[in-house]
Each structure stands twice: as structure tokens, then as C-alpha cells.
Amino acid sequence: MLDAIRFDPRGLVPCIAQQHDTGEVLMMAWMNREAAEETLATGRVCYFSRSRGGLWRKGETSGQQQRLVELRLDCDGDTLLALVDQTGVACHTGRRSCFFLALRDGALAEIAAPEVPPEELYGR
Amino acid sequence: MLDAIRFDPRGLVPCIAQQHDTGEVLMMAWMNREAAEETLATGRVCYFSRSRGGLWRKGETSGQQQRLVELRLDCDGDTLLALVDQTGVACHTGRRSCFFLALRDGALAEIAAPEVPPEELYGR
């Protein structure tokens, strides 16, 4: 499968994480080849952090891991869809999904509240 | 909302299209500011085609349009999630979703068949 992925010139591919049973889109992040390999080998989702410039084992700090249920590839091979089982929350703000801002009545509205205080995720 | 979007150095932002009622992830494509503006103004999803270098009014050729139900933004402002009502199929191969390849038993498997022959979408 790794050979079928078309990484961009930076060596990265976007990966959408979707909760496998509810269908909720949790987040979108990037993988390089090594992150995709590790994800497939361990069954735990690993991204590539563009800000830190290294592997980002989701939940390593926060405990909010993603167990891989199935990895899918799109028609032109340049986007991944990871069906996952998310432990706790996906967002660093303590919300279940990163997509908690919605355009409603012409303005951005927060449509979900934090389920966990962020300092509880990263403060230990 | 447009001012809250963090476009990348190319002026693009990835946009995930999800069928609003079933939760199915249909596709991922890119928008520039103009495409996002047009999407919000018309209620019909418009992307930016990187291959053609211009606006891509989804369904303009194929008839398989996406009506915008709600546009969401993620926590760091660099990814959009469009909840849409997809007419027909989203994928140029005639499949409902672009994510029809899944890694199963160590190999990529096609998990969905075309619902429409592609030549019917583009042949007219």
C-alpha cells in the first residue's frame, strides 16, 4: 500500500481521521512514509508533525490515542482516510473533534465544548 | 470566516467533503480564497483544481454537484470540513466516495463498485 501512496514534494500526505463507528470526522493531519509505516505496523496512528519536524505518535503525551481500524486511500492516491477508534478526545483543546467551529448566521460559532480541560491532557 | 482560514503558502486550504446525513467522507480537495468565497456565496461547493490551475465548480461537467449544508473550520484554522448534500456520486470513477481503496489482508482492495459508468459522467 505504501507504494500506492503519492506523497507530495515534501514527502507528506494528508490523512483524515474518522471515528469508525459514528462517522465523526475527528481531525486531519499529515503523514510521511515513516509515519504511515509505523501506523500500519503498530495499529496506532502516527502522524508527522510539520511544526516539530518529526514523528507524532498521537496520544503519546495526552494519552488520547487512535487505534487504527482501517486505512483507506483515495482514487488518485494522494489522500488517506484512517478509520480509527479514538480514546477520549482528538483535539488538543479537549474537544472530541478538531472541527468545532462552524459558520452559522454569518459568523464562526463554537458548536462543541471541551470535554476535558486541555491542561489535564498536557499538564502531567 | 474567510479571514479565520489559514491558507498555505500556495494560497490553498484542504477541504474534506462529508455527506451531511450519513457521515460518509466523500472526497478531499483544495480551495483558494476565491473558491471558498464562491462556495459560501452560492451554496454550491467550488474547489480549486491544482492540475488545471483554476476554479473547479464541482459537478459543472458531470452534474454531480455538492450543495453546502455547513462549513466548518478546525482548531488551528488550516483545514475545512464541508458538510454537503452530494448529488449522485462524488468520485470521477463513478463511485460514491473517492476513498474506495482499503488495505485488507496486506493488499489494497476495492471496497466499492462504480454506481455510474464514468463515461456517462463526462461523455456528454
Image (cartoon, coloured by chain):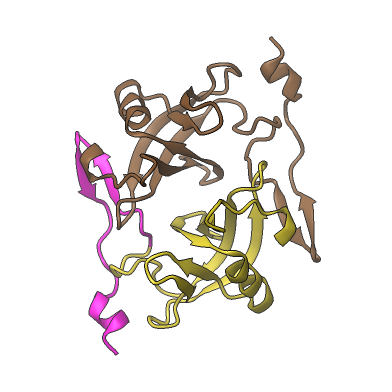
Chain colours: A brown, B yellow
Measured as percent of width and height from the top left, residue B93 is found at 28, 67
Identify which residue is drawn at 42% across, 64% down. B50
Q: Is residue A69 left or right of residue B85?
A: left
The extreme top residue here reads A124
Q: Residue at x 39, y 70 (%)?
A: B89
Residue B49: within the magenta?
no
Q: In the image, what residue occupies the spot 30% across and 57% down? A: A76
- Specify start and end residues of the magenta stretch as a single range: B97-124
Considering the image in quadrants, where does the N terminus of chain B appear? Answer: bottom right
* Residue A34 position (above or below residue B26): above
- Residue B17 percent location from the top left of the image: 51, 59
How many tags in the picture?
0
Tell me: residue B78, above or below residue A116.
Answer: below
Q: Residue B25 in the image: x percent, y percent?
A: 46, 54
On the picture, is B95 further left or further right than A57? left
| Residue B69 vs residue A34, the one in the foreground | A34
| Residue A83: quadrant of the picture | top left
Q: Is residue B75 above or below residue B52?
A: above
Q: Is residue B99 above or below residue A4?
A: below
